[in-house]
Amino acid sequence: MAKKQVPSSIKDETLVLKRRNQMIKGAVTLFIEKGFHKTTTREIAKASGFSIGTLYEYIRTKEDVLFLVCDSIYQRVKARMETLIDPHEPTVESLVRAIRSYFQLMDDMQDEVLVMYQEVKSLPRDAQDYVLQKERDMVAMLEEVIKNSLPENRSQDEIRLIANNIFVQGQMWGFRRWILQRSFTLETYTDLQVKLLLEGVHQFEKEKS
């Protein structure tokens, strides 16, 4: 989808991937410092280590760069989750492992995630829809883990809400880092979020029984 939406005049796929990764890294740094609208394509090219002419061999517009940033984030999240999470392993431990893996990735990518949510509104509608669908896909992966890990008498609405809570808690580690990271390490933050989740599930089951 990303290749289709952002065509390149270069046919060497390996080179396209290399240049676009350079572009993404340089763009994220600039978007954090200046914001998307105040950053120029010439600045992105310089931060990426090549000329403005070379830049336009791989993209058409500055919005294309932002789309590549957003798409890269979700591709990395999806790949990490698929590698470390077995949605069919029916244990609470698999859910805890999924949460820890996801929170660690949000820590690793907190700058990129912050940029994406600040600037995604600048993308064209079709690209916004694509990014949002990626997010829904990842929440669905968490839903599958929860469905297989927690007691069976849980409604789909409950599963969906738990999955979205976990998703937002991971993002919150970066969004509110200015206050959270003064009080918690990633490990203590994750431990407490897991503890509160499991305690809430246990209490809910007691009330239903």
Image (cartoon, rainbow, N blue to C red):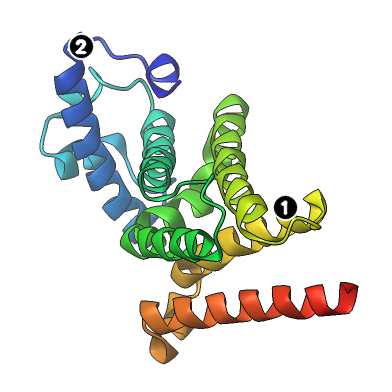
Separation of residues labelled 1 and 2 (CA atoms): 42 Å
- The image shows residue 80 at horizontal and vertical percentages of 36, 47
How crowded pointer 1 is (Cα within 10 Å; few <14, some 14-19, many 20+) is rated as some
Q: Secondary structure at mark 1?
A: helix
Residue beneath label 1, please?
160
Residue furthest out toward the right = 208
Identify the image quadrant of the C terminus.
bottom right
Could you say which quadrant of the image residue 178 lies in? bottom left
Label placed on residue 10: 2
Q: Is residue 147 above or below residue 12?
A: below
Q: Is residue 200 above or below residue 169?
A: below
Work out whether mark 1 precedes mark 2 in sequence or the reverse, and give the earlier one: 2
Identify the amino acid type marked 1: Arg
Q: Is residue 109 above or below residue 93?
A: above
Q: Is residue 192 left or right of residue 159?
A: left
Tag 1 near tag 2, CB within 8 Å:
no
Q: Residue at x 72, y 77 (%)?
A: 202
Q: Residue at x 41, y 24 (%)?
A: 2
Number of residue marks: 2
Q: Is residue 95 left or right of residue 85?
A: right
How crowded pointer 2 is (Cα within 10 Å; few <14, some 14-19, many 20+) is rated as few
- The image shows residue 166 at horizontal and vertical percentages of 59, 63
- The image shows residue 91 at horizontal and vertical percentages of 54, 60
Q: Residue at x 43, y 54 (%)?
A: 113
> Which numbered mark, 1 or 2, is in the foreground of this view?
1
Q: Is residue 183 left or right of residue 128?
A: left
- The image shows residue 147 at horizontal and vertical percentages of 67, 51
Residue closest to the eye, 118 or 102 = 102
Q: Residue at x 46, y 49 (%)?
A: 116
Identify the amino acid type marked 2: Ile
Q: Secondary structure at mark 2?
A: loop
Residue closest to the eye, 184 or 94 = 94
